[in-house]
Image: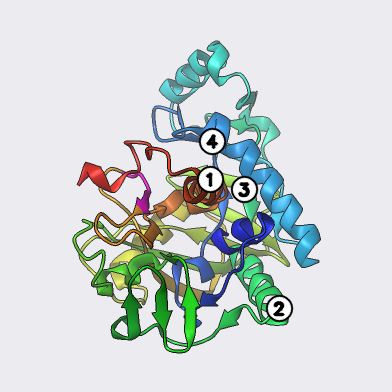
């Protein structure tokens, strides 16, 4: 996304990236959900971020000649009467009006879905097939000779007024490394709080829904009776594989949404580049003026990245003071 943004502003860009099949981008569910948590609160900066993200992805579908944006309805399945009252309270709040849709009574929900208290429609939610987006982007960058598919070697970077990396000269380098940032000697002091996420792909002939379902986990229909189900948060295990405990957690939560028969088709796990305060980290290295970082998007990467890619591009041109919430100064 950073590359697309800079190219759209007329910059000369080279991406150095060794494809990593188990990166979080390659298994991400890609749901943009403006209302989250038990208290049904608005996601941080969602009023600015959501419309910007949706338009950006739509524009990139045209540029990349690919389809990766999905506008499935998102249903928040209520767990109690308290959820219903909270939903009504939010509906009455003008600040929440763009996102709080109608409530659906239990009898109007397909019997394959366990929803004895009904559900609410979250408006403006959408999804992005992140693997399709990144795949199409790689093809696009390759076609323009802007992708160098190799592992980046930090010790080969020579820093002065300009940057020299092997036979490449550049004015600036932006590190967008996800959880692999822990290997970066220039930014190793940033206190990342990586979170492993696990996900199942299941097949169910019984479950009937074209909507994304949300009740502690997401159930995402992808066609042919296949559904993505997840995800977990694991803080003390950085292996990129599904654990017995993670699988069981997902299955227990799924069975509360649908008790019908299903089979597990595939399991996947990846490490999210998260921060403890759940805010990105964007900006310039405190000593090296031509080194930058763009990271820490965490679970909200699909919604945050377009807006803050544009923010970073503007910062490179205008050198304004970075927002305190995302600045490295907070560390």
Vertical order, 169 against 29 (above or below): below
Return the residue found at the far front. Answer: 161
Q: Do tag 4 and tag 3 residues touch (Cβ < 8 Å)?
A: no
Residue that label 4 marks: 34
Residue at 62 percent across and 45 percent down: it is 53
Which x, y percent locates residue 22? 45, 77
Report which residue position mark 3 lands on: 212
User: How far across and how far down the image is residue 114, in percent?
Assistant: 54, 43
Of 286 and 104, nearer the camera is 286
Along the viewing direction, whichever of 115 and 292 lies nearer the viewer: 292
Give the alpha-carbon distance from disc 1 to disc 3, as whole Å: 35 Å
Inter-mark Cα distance, 3 to 2: 36 Å
Please report the residue visible at 29 percent of the width from the left and 62 percent of the height from the top: 288
Q: Counting residues from the N terminus, which is met first, the one under dot 1 or under dot 4?
A: 4
What mark, if any, has residue 102 been given in the picture?
none
Q: Secondary structure at mark 4?
A: loop
Segment colored magenta: 278-283
Q: Position of residue 127 (x, y in %)?
A: 63, 51
């Amino acid at each position: 996304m950073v590359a697309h943004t800079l190219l759209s502003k007329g910059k000369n860009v080279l991406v150095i990236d060794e494809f990593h099949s188990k990166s979080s981008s390659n298994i991400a569910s890609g749901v943009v959900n403006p209302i989250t948590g038990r208290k049904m609160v608005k996601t941080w900066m969602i009023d600015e971020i959501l419309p910007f993200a949706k338009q950006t992805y739509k524009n990139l579908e045209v540029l990349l000649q690919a389809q990766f944006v999905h506008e499935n309805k998102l249903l928040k399945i209520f767990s109690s009467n308290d959820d219903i009252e909270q939903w009504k309270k939010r509906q009455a709040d003008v600040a929440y009006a763009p996102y709080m849709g109608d409530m659906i009574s239990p009898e109007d929900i397909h019997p394959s879905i366990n929803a004895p208290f009904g559900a609410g429609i979250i408006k403006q939610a959408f999804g992005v097939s992140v693997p399709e987006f990144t795949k199409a982007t790689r093809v696009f960058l390759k076609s323009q000779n802007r992708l160098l598919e190799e592992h980046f070697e930090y010790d080969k970077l020579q820093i002065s007024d300009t940057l020299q990396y092997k036979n490449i000269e550049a004015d600036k380098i932006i590190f967008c490394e996800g959880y692999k940032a822990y290997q970066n000697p220039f930014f190793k002091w940033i206190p990342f709080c990586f979170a492993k996420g696990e996900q199942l792909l299941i097949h169910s002939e019984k479950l009937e829904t074209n909507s994304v379902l949300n009740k502690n986990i997401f159930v995402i229909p992808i066609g042919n009776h296949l559904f993505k189900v997840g995800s977990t948060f694991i803080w003390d295990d950085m292996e990129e594989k599904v654990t017995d405990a993670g699988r069981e957690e997902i299955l227990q939560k799924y069975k509360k949404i649908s008790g019908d028969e299903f089979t597990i088709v595939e399991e996947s796990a990846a490490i999210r580049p998260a921060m403890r305060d759940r805010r990105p980290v964007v900006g310039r290295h405190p000593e090296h003026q031509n080194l930058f970082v763009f990271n820490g998007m965490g679970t909200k990467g699909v919604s945050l990245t377009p807006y803050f890619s544009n923010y970073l591009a503007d910062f490179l041109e205008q050198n304004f003071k970075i927002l305190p919430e995302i600045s490295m100064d907070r560390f």
